[in-house]
Image: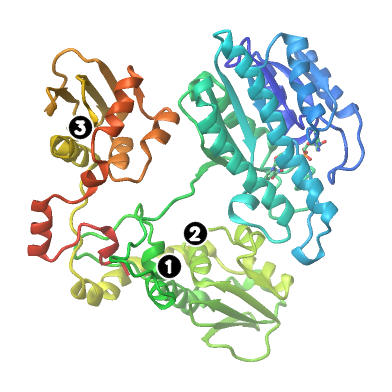
Amino acid sequence: MGLLDGKVAVITGAGGGIGRCHALLFAREGAKVVVNDLGGSRDGSGKSEKMADAVVSEIRAQGGQAAGHYQSVATSEGARSLVKTAIDAFGRCDILVNNAGILRDKTLIKMSEEEWDLVIAVHLRGSFLCGQAFAQHVKDRAEQGDLGGRIVNTSSYAGLMGNFGQSNYAAAKAGIYGLTKVWALELAKLGVTVNAIAPMAKTRMTDDIAQVPDDMKPEQISPMVLFLCSEQAKDVNGKIFGIHGQQLLEYKMIMTQGVTKKGPEHWTPSEIAQSLAAIGADASAPAPAAGGPAPITPEQIIDKAFTRLPEVFLPEKAAGWKAVLHFEIAGASPWTVVIALWKCTTKKGLDGTPTCVVKTNAQTYSDIVLGKERPEKAFMAGKITATNLGDMMRMGGAFDMKKAKDLADAEARAAAPAASAPAAQAAPAPAKEATPAEIIAKAFEKLPEIFMADKAKGWAPTLHFEIKNADDWTVKIADGKCTVAKGKQGTATCVVKTDAQTYADIVAGKERAEKAFMGGKITATNLGDMMKFGTAFDMKKGREPSSTSRARAARTGRSRSRTGSARP
Ligand code: NAI
């Protein structure tokens, strides 16, 4: 039994690289595969049927079923005929993997309009057109009662995080992120899930990029795509997964809690400048324990790392190397590292004539010191630059980086209490954060208070809420009154199912109910009841602290908001 038995998959750009690996794996798992490839070169010039045909032959040789398609995904004719090929050859289409791509890298000022247009056309327009043709087919099927499908798009680190010299490619890949998010909402009602991957693998596209190691194989990318297209991922929608060799990760766009100014006056630029850190504070980052230590700062980590650098120097790896390296680090002090006569010395400040100037910022460098970021990756992403690559490469080999990380970890642990003492004394400890289950219980208890009887005339439902990782609740409306009770009471006119985090996020206004609904995170057996539920309560009032909690906050002087916490 294969994971894709009976399914028909269309994979674009499957004549080589990552797409070919998807096609071979999908066929081994029982899918009938349409192998699309224009068969041109890495920069999108030329065309040939050979690449797609070769993969079709490989699939047939391993006992699978496949058909070739050779048109460009960047034209509507190409996209429509691609889906038609699947229908003509195999009767339907269940899966679309948008993978085709080209590269034409240039820095902003040097990039021509043609280079911009072509890269956007293949990646972004191609994904849009193929997605549209596929969605139309699924809609036609759905009208006959045959719902369901999978789309996996291909984004990239460059588009999600930025990369030097890739305006066209990054813009296209960021656009594909947007397509993924929008389609995940729009196509949920057809039973289609839409996710994206951001791969990293050695292919012809990355052949000349030293920072992508040879042991990151395109074959390592395909199992994630297979998973997303299988039944096992039926509840995974709108997500972006990174695959770097054996490492799997998820990219997440977060909205911070932000800061709300009270009163009618608009924000002024100087107020914004003062509040910038609070505006950007990540509410999901773990807050320090009440009154507990604040973490050591990046600047402190960097100072310690440079001070102790001579201890981890490996003289035998630096034979004949003479260098003066200047480190200019935004947000931290500059440092000089001198290598001469089998010795390494370091000094705060910039000293002597450099053979190499390294520029970076405090967060990046401290992440590298702590092993949270790989230097090559930071380099590739333009977060570090150096005027002398030879010195930089030797620097990477001439120090025992593992020992350096262990020293830095130990320093960070030892320094934390001392560094935090004044901050801990100065600021009040943050209030304990309520759990999702507690937030939900409070919200249900408050419902009768915010019920708007005039909006619920003639409506007499009994709603059961089954909430994973929180209590079940019953909400009953009768005779213009709302009552709530823990547990499932009476016979339900509507059963609502969700999980504690989703419901707590809706209550807190962090997630829109309709979006959670469309994303499949909430289901309800009676849509009419759900719609009325949305309008019969004053949800805004529901989010305001109750009069008792306001009084408590005033007494203790503590804010319930995390933005008022003692984080540095
Ligand atoms: P690749 O160059 O081996 O594969 C791309 C394939 O797309 C080629 O076979 C090419 O002929 C085909 N193609 C190009 N234009 C086409 C068009 N207009 N219509 C149909 N087919 C077309 O490169 P690779 O690495 O396998 O890339 C696959 C996808 O993964 C691309 O979207 C790429 O941007 C993405 N990606 C790859 C990374 C890597 O590390 N290899 C990193 C991030 C993203």
Instruction: Rate crowding at label 2 as few (under 14), some (14 to 19) or many (20 or more) other CA atoms within 10 Å.
Output: some
Q: Quadrant of residue 202?
A: top right
Tell me the quadrant of ligand 1.
top right
Identify the residue shown where x is 15% and y is 39%: 446
Q: Is residue 227 above or below residue 449?
A: above
Q: Is mark 2 within 8 Å of ligand 1?
A: no
Task: From the top left corner, tell me how far across and down residue 418 is, in percent.
Answer: 27, 75
Identify the residue under disc 2.
371
Say whether residue 36 is left or right of residue 249: right
Identify the mark at residue 408; answer none if there is no mark: 1
Instruction: Rate crowding at label 3 as few (under 14), some (14 to 19) or many (20 or more) other CA atoms within 10 Å.
Output: few
| 358 or 527: nearer the viewer | 527
Task: From the top left corner, tell me how far across and down residue 81 is, in percent.
Answer: 80, 22
Tag 2's secondary structure?
loop
Q: Is residue 60 above or below residue 189?
A: above
Q: Hey, what amino acid is under mark 3?
A: Asp
Q: Are marks 1 and 2 in contact (CB under 8 Å)?
A: no
Specify which label sits upstream in the sequence, 1 or 3: 1
Q: Hey, what amino acid is under mark 1?
A: Ala
Q: Are marks 2 and 3 in contact (CB under 8 Å)?
A: no
User: CA separation, marks 2 and 3?
Assistant: 60 Å
| 520 or 379: nearer the viewer | 520
Say whether residue 239 is left or right of residue 294: right
Q: Is residue 464 above or below residue 109?
A: above
Specify which label sits upstream in the sequence, 1 or 2: 2
Identify the residue under disc 3.
454
Quadrant including the N terminus: top right
Specify which label sits upstream in the sequence, 2 or 3: 2
Q: Hey, what amino acid is under mark 2?
A: Gly
Say whether residue 538 is left or right of residue 119: left
Tag 3's secondary structure?
helix
